[in-house]
Amino acid sequence: MAMDDATFKVFVDRLTITGDYVAPSWSWASGRGGVSFNCPESDENRRKATHWRQECLHIEPRVTLKGADPYGQLKHASLVIESRIRPLAQYRHKLGSWGNPGYVGSEEEPVAKVHVDWAAHTDGPPEDLQMLLLGSAELDEACPGAASQPQPWGDRDGVQVRRQRLAYGLLVWPVPGTDVFLRVGIVHSIPNRHGGGLSFFEGWGERTVTLI
């Protein structure tokens, strides 16, 4: 998770204006502040997260170098992902930045938590934010022997298993006038009685998106 004290407009301009380009939004190198690798490893009952697996159906990086050096500066990079996606606006929510996560659902017992990569307190939230599913993990061997590779949704876990898997993904934003998205935050959902966990993503439509 990147930590940037910029407004949303400044944050987006850094990622989309050619002269300022350093790395794609999905790379930690695109941030102008600190970086925290803090994927949740347990829930409120301290159940350990294990057996992490990919939930997106397809993921493909595409990188164009600026020169001949394979470790040199990038000209462009994108990440094509086919997965479940849903507008954040369909749920009651509040945005939050690093150190102060926002929530989806109720503040007391959220169905998911949201961290954004810009300083959310500096301006109003942008429209059209979307939640994109990436993966999940078991909590304390809730479903031993789970597959490590993505499979058709209906051919694997039953409802009870999905309710016990932690799920995580990206908060993405469609760049106006284009067919591409920016990664602007992260979202994760821990199983609870309000429908959290992997079951939170049930019924979501599948779509192929390109992150730049």
Image (tube, rainbow, N blue to C red):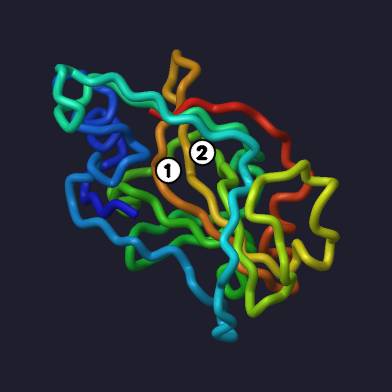
Q: Can you identify the residue that label 1 sits on?
A: 125
Percent x, y of residue 187: 51, 54
**Residue 207: mark in rendering:** none
Tell which of 191 and 79 is nearer to you: 79
Identity of the residue drawn at 15% across and 17% down? 67
Displayed quadrant of residue 140: bottom right
Tell which of 19 and 23 is nearer to you: 23
Displayed quadrant of residue 57: top right
- Horizontally, residue 125 falls left or right of residue 22, namely right
Q: Do the residues labelled 2 and 1 touch (CB within 8 Å)?
A: yes
Identity of the residue drawn at 59% across and 66% down? 51
Give the structural element (helix, strand or loop) at label 1: loop
Residue type for callout 1: Pro
Percent x, y of residue 188: 54, 59
**Residue 129: mark in rendering:** 2
Looking at the image, is 20 positioned above or below residue 114? above
Q: Can residue 92 be seen in this view?
A: yes
Q: Can residue 106 be seen in this view?
A: no
Give the structural element (helix, strand or loop) at label 2: loop
